[in-house]
Image (tube, grey):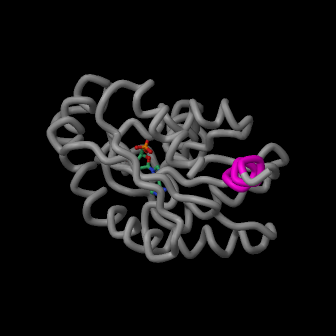
Amino acid sequence: MAAAEDKDGNRRLVFLGAPGSGKGTQAQLLAEHLRVPAISTGEMLRAAKAAGTPLGRRVGEIMQKGLLVDDDTMADVVRDRLSQDDARQGFILDGYPRTAVQVETLEELLHELGTEIDAVVTLHVDEEELLQRALARNRQDDTEEIIRERLAVYHRQTEPLVAHYRQAGKLVEVDGMGTVGEVARRLTEALAR
Ligand code: AMP
């Protein structure tokens, strides 16, 4: 009974982690397992860019530089997505929130929808490993300079959110070193606790 409650209770999750931490992969695996959508704001913006929508044209250059898109734009993107039917029974947010303002926006948004975040997962990976993984991914815009910029942006703007969620008692910290399968197992165990 308690296990079933725990499982049902962990359906609204945020993945917080540096670029290259494997959070996208783990978010997707867990989403399939929980049967909830994995919502990656980065993927949404890349799709908008590829489709040449007004949003995509507006954010393209910022993304190219490894910088963050402004909070107001991101609020619209996330509000639209979380309001869709498939997100009503749960979701995994990958890549949002990334700033203190986005944390507040998300809280307000979920409050309007009559719900809240159950847990925030953070994956810990060594800095050198982060760089190696990001380089290996070899996306078109993944030059070492851009990757370093993205890491710096993460440390400056997003890492402070870890302390916020820890204080709120929502943080689940997982060792992100090792294979995809090893990390997935650790993650499932940590969420079941
Ligand atoms: P990602 O795939 O999550 O690393 O996102 C790729 C890029 O999209 C980032 O480097 C940002 O330029 C932009 N982006 C994605 N999510 C956000 C967000 N929550 N806030 C600001 N910019 C974002």
The mark tally for this picture is: 0
Can you tell which quarter of the image residue 177 is in? top left
Please tell me which residue lies in front, 118 or 59: 118
Return the x and y of residue 170 as percentages of the image width and height.
Answer: 53, 66
| Residue 189 locus on image (x, y percent) | 52, 42
Nearer to the camera, 7 or 135: 7
Farthest residue, direction right: 85
Quick check: is 14 in the magenta stretch? no
Front-most of 1 and 161? Answer: 1
Residue at 69% in and 60% down? 79
Q: Quadrant of residue 34?
A: top right
Q: Which residues are magenta?
A: 3-11
Q: Position of residue 64 (x, y in %)?
A: 33, 42
Asked whether, in this view, residue 89 is left or right of residue 118, the answer is right
Q: 1 left or right of 180? A: right
Say above or below: 36 vs 135: below
At 36% from the left and 62% from the top, the residue drawn is 158
- Overall secondary structure of the magenta stretch? helix
Identify the residue at image location x=26%, y=60%: 155
Tell me residue 112's x, y (percent). Answer: 78, 73
Compared to residue 136, the image places residue 101 above or below, namely: below
Tell me if 77 is positioned left or right of 185 in this view: right
Vertical order, 43 against 81 (above or below)? above
Residue at 14 percent of width and 39 percent of height: 128
